[in-house]
Image: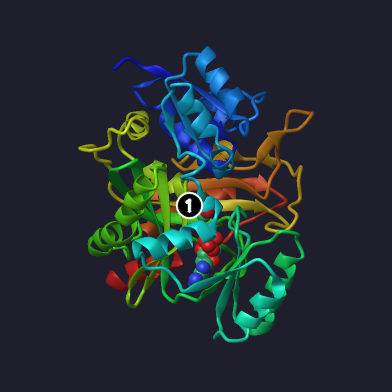
Amino acid sequence: MNPFPILLLGSGGREHALAWKLAQSPLCAQLFVAPGNPGIAASATLLPGIDILDGVAVADWALGNGIGLVVVGPEAPLAAGVADAVRAAGIPVFGPSAAAARLEASKGFTKELCDDANIPTAAYARFSALQPALAYLATQPVPIVVKADGLAAGKGVTVATTRAEAEEALRALFAEPGAEVVIEAFLEGEEVSFFVLADGATALPLLAAQDHKRVGDGDTGPNTGGMGAYAPARVFTPELQARTLREIVEPTLEAMARRGTPFTGVLFTGLMLTASGPSLIEYNVRFGDPECQVLMSLFDGDLAALLLAAAKGQLSGEEARWKPGAAATVVVAARGYPGTPARGGEISGLDAAQADGAIVFHAGTAHNAAGALVASGGRVLAVTATGSTVGEAVEKANAAVEKVSFADGFHRADIGWREIARERAES
Ligand code: AMP
Ligand code: GLY
C-alpha cells in the first residue's frame, strides 16, 4: 500500500502521543493535526483553523487534501458525529459513530446495554429529579457512587463514603436544569483500563494500564482526568483478559452490531477487578489520557496500518506487538487543577528532561505573545519513560520531571505505587 496523508483531531497529551507514533509509521506520508499543540508541531503540520466539532468542515478539508485516514482523539467530536460525517464522505475514519459513542456519552445507555447483554456491572438506578434520588439514596448502603449522565471528562463522579456526601453531590448535579443522574453500588477492588481495538465486529486486545485518578499522593483528593499511568498492568492476568473479552467486550460489540450501531475505534474498558471477577465501571470510546502515552511508548509496530485496518473492518488476523518492559507517565499539572488551573506559567527545561530518553508529551501548552512556552490547561505535560520494570520507568520519568522548570506545576510522586510494591515483593 502506498503511503497517504493522515489527519488527527485533538490537542492533548493523548494526541501528542498518537501523533508521535503515527509520524513514525511507514504508511504516513504526511501528518496533519487539528488543532494540535506546540509539542505536536515537532512531528506534524498543525491546522488551528478547523473546528473539530464540525463534521462537515472536517470531512471537506480531508476530501480536499487527499486524506487517507482520519483519527479522532477525544470524545467530544465523536459524540458530535464527526466520524459519521467523515465516513459519509468515503474517507476511512478511526472512531465510532455518534450512535456508538453513546457507550461513553451516556452512562444510562451503557447500563441498559449491560442489562440486555448480561454484562457484569455495578447495580444502579437512574434519576431525573432530586427527590426520588434522595429517597433511593436513603435505602442504600455506603460507600455509594453518584454520577452525572453525560460527558464530564472524568470529573462528574463522586465516590461518597457518607450519605451526606452523596446527598451533597446529588444536590449539586440537580442544580443544573435537565440533569440525569446515575446512583450506583460501590465496587471494591483494583481498577484497570483495558484497551481493545474494534472494527465493528472483531476485537483486537491492546494492553491494560493503570491510571491514577485522584489528584494527590496516596490516591487522595478529588478525581481528575488522570495524574499518571503505567503499563502493562500485570494484575490484569491473561486469564482475566480472556474473561473480560468473553464476558464484557465481545457481548458489547455483538449488542452494538445487533442494534445497527457497530462500534469502530478503540473501546476503553474501565474495569474493577472485584473478588467475583471483572466488573465494568464505564466505557470510553477513545484512548485514555494519560494511558495512551504509555501504550504508545510500548507499541511496536505500524500504528497507521492498525488503525486503518480497524477503520476498514479488517482487524481479523491482525495483532498488536509490544516492546518488552514497562512504561510510565507522570502528569505535571498547573496549580489549582482539577479546579481552576493557573494559566500562563512559563515552562522550560524540556530538552534537559528528554536528554536521557524520556519523552515530554504536551497536554496543555501554548506559546504566549513573547513566544515562550506556557501552561494553557489543567494537565500541562505528561512526562513519559520506559524501563525493564514499572519501578525503573517511574524512576526515569520522575528524574525527567525534576529537570522541567515550571513554577506553577505540581505532580504526584507515587505513580505506579501498587505495581512497584508488587515488584519489590517479588525481588
Ligand atoms: P467514571 O467516570 O465512571 O470512570 O468514574 C470515575 C472514577 O470513579 C472511576 O475511575 C473509579 O475510580 C470511580 N468509580 C466509578 N464508579 C465506581 C463504582 N461503582 N465503584 C467504585 N468506584 C467507582
Ligand atoms: N485517564 C482516564 C481517561 O482518559 O478518561
User: Where 275 sits versus 43, above or below?
Assistant: below
Q: Which residue is mark 1?
A: 103
Residue 93 visible? The answer is yes
Which residue appears at 40% of the width and 17% of the height? 4
In what element is the residue under mark 1?
helix
Nearer to me, 375 or 78? 78
Q: Position of residue 367 (x, y in %)?
A: 71, 32
Which residue appears at 75% of the width and 59% of the height? 177
User: Where 164 sits versus 177, above or below?
Assistant: below
Nearer to me, 315 or 216? 315
User: Where 97 sits versus 222, above or below?
Assistant: above
Residue 56: which quarter of the image?
Answer: top right
Q: Position of residue 67 (x, y in %)?
A: 46, 18
Which residue appears at 67% of the width and 79% of the height? 134
Q: Position of residue 34 (x, y in %)?
A: 59, 28
Task: Name the colour scheme.
Answer: rainbow
Residue 46: which quarter of the image?
Answer: top right
Residue type at mark 1?
A: Leu
Q: Say left or right for 354 vs 278.
A: right
For the residue carrying disc 1, how many other residues have a C-alpha within 10 Å: few (<14), some (14-19), or many (20+)? many
Residue 173: which quarter of the image?
Answer: bottom right
Which residue appears at 35% of the width and 59% of the height? 233
For the N terminus, the image quarter is top left
Nearer to me, 121 or 11? 121
User: Where 271 sits versus 170, above or below?
Assistant: above
